[in-house]
Image: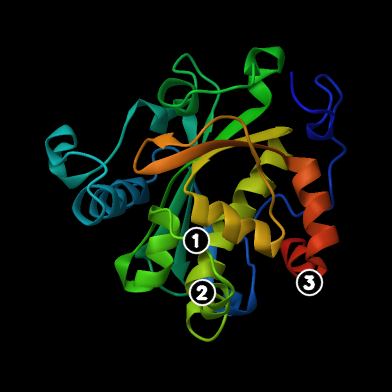
Amino acid sequence: MMHDRMGVPGIPVNPLPLPLTGACPVGESSSLFEYSKILPGDPLLLEVFRLRYKVYVEEWGFERGEDHPGGMERDPYDDHSVHFVVRRKGERRIIGTVRMILNSEHGFPIEKHCTLDRDLSALDRDGFGEISRLAISKEYSRRTTDSVYRDRAPVTAEMFRQMYGGKRRIENDIVLGLYRCICVESLERGNEYLLAVMARGLVTLLRRVGIVFEAIGPEQNYHGMRTPYLGRVETMLEELSRRNPDLYSRFLK
């Protein structure tokens, strides 16, 4: 069973006053970018797959090109996911994407690729979403950030200062903006929990800005060394409001 602080199964989450539609701005760079949800059948979804191919196949080598013909990285979970993109305002080309996988007959990737020390079967599976396929265009990602999101690089005080100072704040605001979209969508759907498989550096970075997940299994090799995590949406937002009121207020815009 889950720790008590993760919430009691069956108790509904009280909605927080987040907007449920429209753009998902966050951070000081929000005036530069707009975030949106891609609806089924939108041809822009093909651009999502192309960006993921560039990142997961060509740049990081996590997926094999022969498994994704046509230069598009996709899998069966895409038909059961909510996809989000970020673009510069006034432009069509996407520069970042993430998806939230919903419950389906395929289950969740975290269950197939990770060893878990929590029994998720005790919770309502329709109340879950798994954060997956975070990808940022190389044009907007930098070596320091890549080492955190992709590898096990520790987030030192100096690295944190660099990543949230000057121009590098922009790329990290992009990631936070996409995570905000996931939170808003979860509240809109009434989903209580978010699953994620993340590198140690990314988890540390999120925690330092006030976004807290709980490990539910050991670190293992899945697209690099990763650990499975669980977060209850309401608890995460409450923790964010306590740890980082400024960022929380921007999440509420």
Q: Position of residue 210 (x, y in %)?
A: 72, 59
Task: Please tell me which residue is depicted at 44% across the width and 17% down the height of the picture.
Answer: 106
Q: Secondary structure at mark 2?
A: helix
Mark earlier in primary sequence (2, 1): 1
Circles 3 and 1, Cβ within 8 Å, touching? The answer is no
Q: Position of residue 239 (x, y in %)?
A: 80, 52
- The residue indicated by pointer 1 is 154
Q: Is residue 167 above or below residue 83?
A: below
Q: Which mark is residue 159?
A: 2
Alpha-carbon distance for marks 2 and 1?
9 Å
Viewer-proximal residue among 79 and 57 = 57
Q: Position of residue 186 (x, y in %)?
A: 67, 40
Residue type at mark 1? Pro
Q: Is residue 3 above or below residue 25?
A: above
Residue type at mark 2? Met
Q: Position of residue 107 (x, y in %)?
A: 49, 19
Using a 10 Å C-alpha cutoff, classify the residue at mark 3 as few (fewer than 14 neighbours), some (14 to 19) or many (20 or more). Answer: few
Q: Which mark is residue 246?
A: 3
Task: Please tell me which residue is depicted at 48% across the width and 84% down the height of the picture.
Answer: 167
Circles 2 and 1, Cβ within 8 Å, touching? The answer is yes
Residue type at mark 3? Asp
Side of 146 where 98 appears, left or right: right
